[in-house]
Image (cartoon, rainbow, N blue to C red):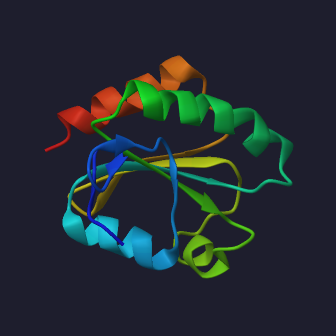
């Protein structure tokens, strides 16, 4: 996998939220940058409600990596991260979790999480 920076993969082509495997997640953590992750599942009505909000946020904030984890597929990662409710939004900076909250977030709430993520040091 290419190194991820901001909301882009490779040569600057914006891709919005990207699907993450356990290995991808570990790579992002080890890179130490800022990223947000939406743990969700297609079968979950709340996840289906939140996904378009998350995708639009990724397009408005191309400087932050937006990842999505399908908890039905990435069961080991979901277990390690102790995901018990979906959707769960998580923000990570410097390898440390700086935000974690289950439930549907509105766009302005995602913006608030991103503002806090940018202030994290």
Nearest the viewer among 5 and 119 is 5
User: In the figure, 20 relative to 92: above or below?
Assistant: below
**Side (left or right) of 105 relative to 93:** right
Quadrant of image for the N terminus: bottom left
Q: Residue at x 79, y 53 (%)?
A: 42
For residue 102, above or below residue 68: above
Residue 25 position (above or below residue 100): below
Instruction: Give residue 106's position: percent from left, percent from top.
Output: 60, 23
Which quadrant: the C terminus?
top left
Q: Position of residue 103 (x, y in %)?
A: 67, 40
In terms of image quadrants, where is residue 15?
Answer: top left
Query: From this viewpoint, is residue 7 visible?
Result: no
Q: Residue furthest left?
A: 121
Decide which of 115, 1 is in the foreground and name it: 1
Side of 31 relative to 101 (left or right): left
Instruction: Residue at 60%, 81% (x, y): give it.
Output: 76
User: Between residues 11 and 63, which one lies in front from this camera angle?
Assistant: 11
Q: Left of 68 or right of it: where is 34?
A: left
Q: Residue lying furthest top in this view?
A: 108
Tally of numbered discs:
0
- Residue 11, image x and y in percent? 26, 51
> Residue 102: image x %, image y %?
63, 45
**Camera sees residue 74:** yes
- Quadrant of the rendered structure where residue 41 is? bottom right
* Residue drawn at (50%, 18%) of the image: 108
> Residue at point 51% right, 65% down?
20
Nearer the observer, 6 or 93? 6
């Amino acid at each position: 996998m290419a190194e991820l920076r901001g909301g882009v993969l490779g040569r600057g082509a914006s891709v919005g939220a990207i699907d993450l495997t356990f290995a991808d997640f570990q790579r992002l953590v080890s890179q130490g940058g800022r990223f947000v992750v939406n743990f969700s599942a297609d079968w979950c009505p709340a996840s289906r409600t939140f996904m378009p909000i998350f995708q639009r946020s990724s397009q408005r904030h191309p400087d932050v990596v937006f990842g999505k984890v399908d908890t039905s597929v990435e069961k080991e990662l979901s277990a390690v991260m102790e995901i018990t409710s979906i959707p769960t939004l998580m923000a990570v900076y410097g390898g440390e979790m700086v935000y974690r909250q289950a439930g549907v977030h509105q766009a302005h709430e995602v913006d608030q999480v991103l503002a806090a993520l940018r202030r994290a040091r």
